[in-house]
Image: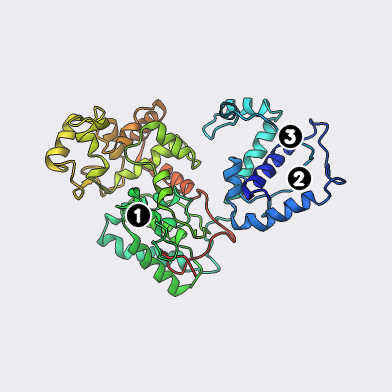
Amino acid sequence: MAKFGDLCNFLVLCILVGIVGSSYGSITAQFYAKRCPQAEKIIEDYVQKHIPNAPTLAAALLRLQFHDCFVRGGPYWNVPTGRRDGRISNASEALANIPPPTSNFSSLQTSFASKGLDLKGLVLLSGIVGCSHAQLQLNFYAKSCPQAEKIIEDYVQKHIPNAPSLAAALLRLQFHDCFVRGCDGSVLLNFTSSTKNQTEKVAVPNQTLKGFSFIDGVKKAVEAECPGVVSCADIVALVARDSVVVTGGPYWNVPTGRRDGRISNASEALANIPPPTSNFSSLQTSFASKGLDLKDLVLLSGAHTIGVSHCPSFSSRLYNFTGVWGKEDPSLDSEYATNLKTKKCKSINDNTTIVEMDPGSAGKFDLSYFKLVLKRKGLFQSDAALTTSATTKSYINQLVQGSLKQFNAEFGQAMEKMGRIEVKTGSAGEIRKHCAVVNN
């Protein structure tokens, strides 16, 4: 029997080619009516059985984010059949022909026209992307748990003023959650002896994460009101927003309806979370793989305006850049580097000292971070990388020359967009009773 992934690839290919229509004369509806009359029914039944349990699988295969639209409320269309399989496959042709998410209008028009698709086809097919977000909505719990968001907000407003630095940690927690398996709360899961699985928590990028007990406290308060209704994934998203607001930062909409994932692997966290040593190319690739563009990269990096880091995240820039002992990163302001070495990270082996990411303004959500980046005083190599691209550097200059109000609004839009990455909705995943463990 063919593997599920192979079947999905075949099905997706059929659907895509079928959209092009009647230009292929030998393709007809019910092509297999005589030779294999149950073929389409078998495929349909298989899809309806398995896709609801893994609705994001189709999107991963299709790269146009079909998600579960075809089997869960999306449109139906005729799929003429009779195609034969090709014998040639070249990576270079895929790179040349598939329009990337960074495409501008001109390149999209050219790309679609080369496949016999007009501007109407471009608009309609682009609309399919929206299907994956259909089940996230504002006030998702309005009927099932009407006090949920108020309970979360009250908890945050009560506790964050006593530990304001936690706001940045909770914001970072959502970022690390969404970049691995989507925004599904998988970063919260503990190791269990039953599975012997090392979860995301223990991965190097997550070893300095904080806020887990805070999330547990919020979950306990919500469960007391509405047991088994509100997901941990939604709590992470709402807490991140509400914590930033308490510190004087922006408010943004948080559509809800996410469900919790049941899988968490340390190896996936290491592979998907961009490290602070990232260069521009790797940052661009990492963000694009999550449906985020260069503007999102700049705006979300702006979260570094609050919070702190530890020396290991940037000490190589001070002591052994590119693996050469005694070499400093030339992209780092020399005076700033000296200050860090003499007053903060006095040794490359320092694993405990805390350093503000936005010195002098680490508790305030403002534009100071971007101003420091332009002065070559960004703490991380990934901060400096933002100035190595004309596009991202231009975005930074626009933000610095603009108003804080504008940055706040655009940051909120980027956060809402990030909060939609590969979400589980409907019957996918579960609603955990305790955020650190999957349900029995």
* Tag 3 residue: 20
Residue 237 seen anywhere in this rendered image of the structure: no
CA separation in Å, label 2 and label 3: 12 Å
Quarter location, residue 119: top right
* Tag 1 residue: 202
Tags 2 and 1 touching, CB below 8 Å: no
Residue type at mark 3? Val
- Which is more N-terminal, label 3 or label 2? 3
- What colour scheme has been applied to the protein in the rendered image? rainbow
Q: Is residue 328 above or below residue 170?
A: above
In the image, residue 354 lies at what x, y percent? 21, 48
Q: Is residue 30 above or below residue 190?
A: above
In the image, residue 66 lies at what x, y percent? 62, 45
Is disc 3 surrounded by few (<14), some (14 to 19) or many (20+) residues within 10 Å? some
Is disc 2 surrounded by few (<14), some (14 to 19) or many (20+) residues within 10 Å? few
**Residue at point 59% right, 31% down?**
98
Residue 39 seen anywhere in this rendered image of the structure: yes
Residue depth check, mark 2 versus mark 1: number of the one nearer the observer: 1
Regarding mark 2 in the picture, which secondary structure is present there? loop
**Residue at point 48% right, 51% down?**
181
- Residue sitting farthest toward the front: 1
Is disc 1 surrounded by few (<14), some (14 to 19) or many (20+) residues within 10 Å? some
CA separation in Å, label 2 and label 1: 46 Å
In the image, residue 79 lies at what x, y percent? 77, 42
Regarding mark 1 in the picture, which secondary structure is present there? helix
Residue type at mark 1? Val
In the image, residue 234 lies at what x, y percent? 46, 59
